[in-house]
Amino acid sequence: MATKTKQPLTSKQRTNRIIITAVIVTVALLIASIGGAIAYSKYLNDGGASRRLISFKTDHYKVNNSMLTYFYFTDAYNYYQNYGAYMSYMAPSQQAPDMTSSLSAQYYDYGTDSGTPQTWHEYLLNMTLSNVQGYLFYAEEAHENNFKCELDKLVNEYIDNLKKDAKSNGLSLNEHLEKFYGNTVKEKDVRAALELQYYANEYLNSVQEDLKSKLTEDDFNNYIKNNADTVNMIDYYSFSFETEIPEDMSQEDKDKADEANKTAAAALEEALNASEDKVATFKEWVSTYLTEQNNLKDEPLSEDDLKTEIETKTTETTNKTKDEKSEFSLWAFEDGRSAGEVKNINEATAKHVVYLLTNPTHIDDDPTKNVRHILITADEYGSDEKAKAKAEEVLEEYRNGKEKSEDAFDAIAEKYNEDGSSFYENVTKGTMVETFDAWIFDEAREVGDTDIVKTEYGYHVMYFSGDGVPTWKSNAQSSLVEEKLTALGEELQAKYEEELVVDQDNLLKIPDALPASAFSEPKETLGGGTTAPAETDPAETNADDTSDTSDTTSADTTEDTAA
């Protein structure tokens, strides 16, 4: 597919921009199903005609069909990019849809005797309609609260980034947009869409930060109390003595295997109970046992493979959730358990498992780290060597500056960073890619440390901001804020749904196939809107087509636009 997006550091750690749909989880679309009765009429027009069709309207904002096409195609491209490899398993036909053919003729869900079939067009468009509804509700709430943000800056940064991508492929911006969105989406439509989306997102981000700052110790204590089964965790070692039981194995052989494993498990249990250093005893006993068993095999493991097996089976395990179906879990999570207790369980025929509890029920106090970074990539600068040189130049710019502070570093990040976010807060160990993770969790690391770290994504100019809150508190914070944001989303739906006007006829005129040209050249970059783009040099992005500016925008009037 002809898209290229900025890669996050890892799939576990996304940028801190909030997507509206993450909190409007219960919004029921006011639009009737586009289904069954939809008859897609190939609606060919210039941007002006599509722009005059208003699909959504609230008191202060409008979304016309050109804007909605931009939102829909962007969501569809992103969905395809994220899940395209798995779509064949999701579609009942076991075939991924052809995104450049009518999605109204391809089924996401064929339905059942009691269900209704759903096309890919319905599925993807309804996802977009839910998103847009969320943008409108949050924008209206922001307007009512006279919320201000650097909206022009955010939108201009994104447009400049798109212009740079277009220029690198010898296109004007509107030619670039036509490649991905067809002839109804122009720069003005993208700007109008981004103004609405960014304004809603920035307001939501501000609400999130406000909610986070107001959490009290009582909130955290109640969270622990109300979520004991998921907050509490245990640490332990375990070793399983088991024999594979083939279907044709005689009962006599099963009994012999069971007895042998039972005897070995009892020996380990006895050794642990008699030891003062139970962890050392466990590792030594298991190592000896595995070595002896390996020597008895017809085809023993190599020395290196045996070493790996021993390391794997003598590694401490952490369980973060109590398993109601596990005898060991129920035992280990009981009140009053203490470190060093041993449990020997007969879990199946010829399977006996010995558990050594090393840390009974506790919350996760592991530290988290806060870090700022500036990502520099070879894609942006032409080669790995040039990216490295640029990273060194950026680091020197900071180190040679008059002020050595986090704010000064952040100001430089605004100019060069290619990641969607320059700040990662409360990062848990193992979340980031290996070299990045190793740098921030280095025991010698001090606030204000800077350096360059290379990862698979490029070169990162680093600034260590210090320790975050303990892991359990970070998790609790996220969960508590999410609960409050979900409640807020429901409140806004009830508050603004009566003023929302949806034109069903105009919704039926949204194209149901993506431009084939978008899937032709991988060098192209898709224009999206969920994260802020990297800042680019305006001198490199000054050429563009002019287009009609007399049609509908996202606000009724300039005065009505709060941002």
Image (cartoon, helix red, strand yellow):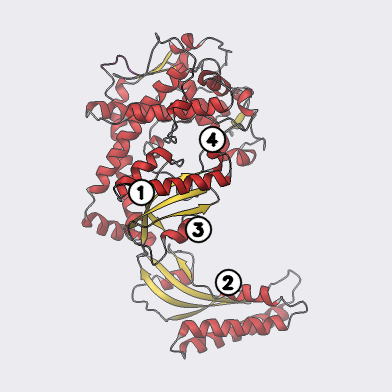
Residue type marked 3: Thr
Q: Find the magenta span and give its range.
A: 555-559
Residue type marked 2: Thr
Task: Identify the image quadrant of the N terminus.
Answer: top right
User: What is the distance, in whole Å, between disc 1 and disc 2 at their CAs?
Assistant: 47 Å
Give the residue number, with chain letter if any, for mark 3: 435
Give the residue number, with chain letter if any, for mark 1: 400
Q: Nearer the viewer, residue 90 or 411?
A: 411
Q: Does label 1 or label 2 sit earlier along the sequence?
A: 2
Which tag is nearer the camera, tag 3 or tag 2? 3
Above or below residue 251? Residue 44 is: above
Q: Find residue 79 and name its label.
A: 4
Instruction: Give SS at disc 4.
Output: helix
Task: Identify the image quadrant of the C terminus.
Answer: top left
Q: Does label 1 or label 4 sit earlier along the sequence?
A: 4
- In the rendered structure, the answer to whether residue 301 lies left or right of residue 67 reads right
Give the residue number, with chain letter if any, for mark 2: 312
Q: Does label 3 or label 1 sit earlier along the sequence?
A: 1
Percent x, y of residue 225: 29, 60
User: What is the distance, in whole Å, between disc 4 and disc 3 at their CAs?
Assistant: 30 Å
Q: Is residue 133 visible?
A: no
Check residue 409 for magenta coloring: no
Query: Which residue is located at x 21 percent, y 56 percent?
Result: 218
Check residue 556 for magenta coloring: yes
Query: Which residue is located at x 25 percent, y 16 percent?
Result: 559
Q: Assess whether mark 2 and mark 3 are in contact (beta carbons under 8 angstroms).
A: no
Q: Does label 4 or label 3 sit earlier along the sequence?
A: 4
